[in-house]
Amino acid sequence: MTEAPEPLLKVCDLRVWFPIRKGVLNRIAGQVRAVDGVSFTILPGETLGLVGESGCGKTTLGRALMGLEKPAGGRIIFNGQDLGALTGQARRQLRRHSQMIFQDPFSSLNPRMTVQELVTEGLVHHRLLQGRTRTESARELLASVGMDGDCLFRYPHEFSGGQRQRISLARALSLQPHFLVCDEPVSALDVSVQAQVINLLLDLRERHGLAYLFISHDLSVVRLMSHRVAVMYLGKIVECGATSDVMETACHPYTRALLSAVPRPGKHQDKRIILTGDLPSPAAPPPGCPFHPRCPQALPVCAQQAPPVRTLDNGHSWACHITPD
Ligand code: SF4
């Protein structure tokens, strides 16, 4: 029997809470539970798609993995090392191997820096040029994302959205990461450009053995990109499994509602499930199952008790009081 590979990333019971302060004394009056007890793993070279409505905590989770938000609890283990236990140089070295791509590359690229400066900034900072010039390194990085080297001395505003996303990718790849958090990387792009960037991400994954956390509200894109999918609702993962299992035999009522809104060309389309009401505030999550105020299948117990997590032999898991038919 072959041994299962070690996860590249292991997230255990991660919590990211933001305090709500009130009054002249600025006392803490409550907590916004943006990420509330999330656990998952990602293998080397694997893509985990993370889906859910806006405001469910997807971006906060991605930012916490990058060290851009301080967790209130839980552990992030990257390459076998607990990020919370590392400090200084050791933490920076490990962080180098995970990078983030944002939805809007225009706001994540410094408008005053040239393309050459942008894509080689990390190399200079970490002293990784290794005797090569910035121009040589920049040309090579741009070539790896399908751009020619004529644009080295141009600025971000001179490029289209798709080209800017390629520049962001070249910048992220400069530090030879093992893991990328892609936060809605194609949502702001035209459909034809979306396909080009998705193909580039797939190609880079293949060539560099990269692992991705692919955050998106678009289930069709997630289906294309991901080996496994996690569905997030109000700061918690409510269903997780292989993409085909979750997409074909979703077990959680929330996942079923999300999927019913996605057209499936050539396949039987389930009846659209319209969810009523808005996503509740993560500052005051409903008791019991957080989905119960909107769930079309809610039982009385759902308002009182947190649902158990059920897991099948194939690793497909979901949190619900009822078993699907
Ligand atoms: Fe719906 Fe109850 Fe399942 Fe929550 S636990 S998803 S409210 S049926």
Image (spheres, rainbow, N blue to C red):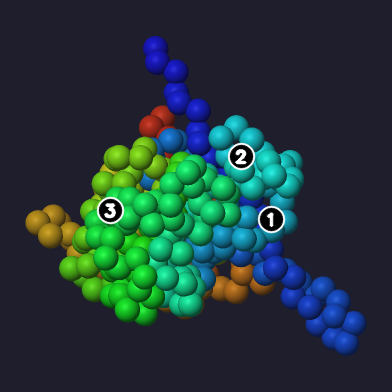
Mark earlier in primary sequence (3, 2): 2
**In-image side of 183 versus 225 (left or right):** right
Horizontal side, residue 306 vs residue 167: left or right: right
Q: For the view shown, which residue lies furthest in the bottom direction?
A: 24
Instruction: Report whether residue 304 is seen.
Output: no
- SS of the residue under disc 3: helix
Residue 139 location (% of width, % of height): 33, 55
Q: Amino acid at mark 3?
A: Ala
Residue contact between numbered discs 3 and 1, judged by CB atoms under 8 Å: no
Mark 3: give few (<14), some (14-19) or many (20+) Cα within 10 Å. few
**Residue 77 - label:** 2
**Mark 1 = which residue?**
71
**How far, Cα to Cα, is label 1 from label 2?**
13 Å
Percent of width and height locating residue 13: 64, 46
Location of residue 73 in the rendering, given as x and y in whole percent from the top left corner: 72, 51
Q: Residue at x 44, y 23 (%)?
A: 4
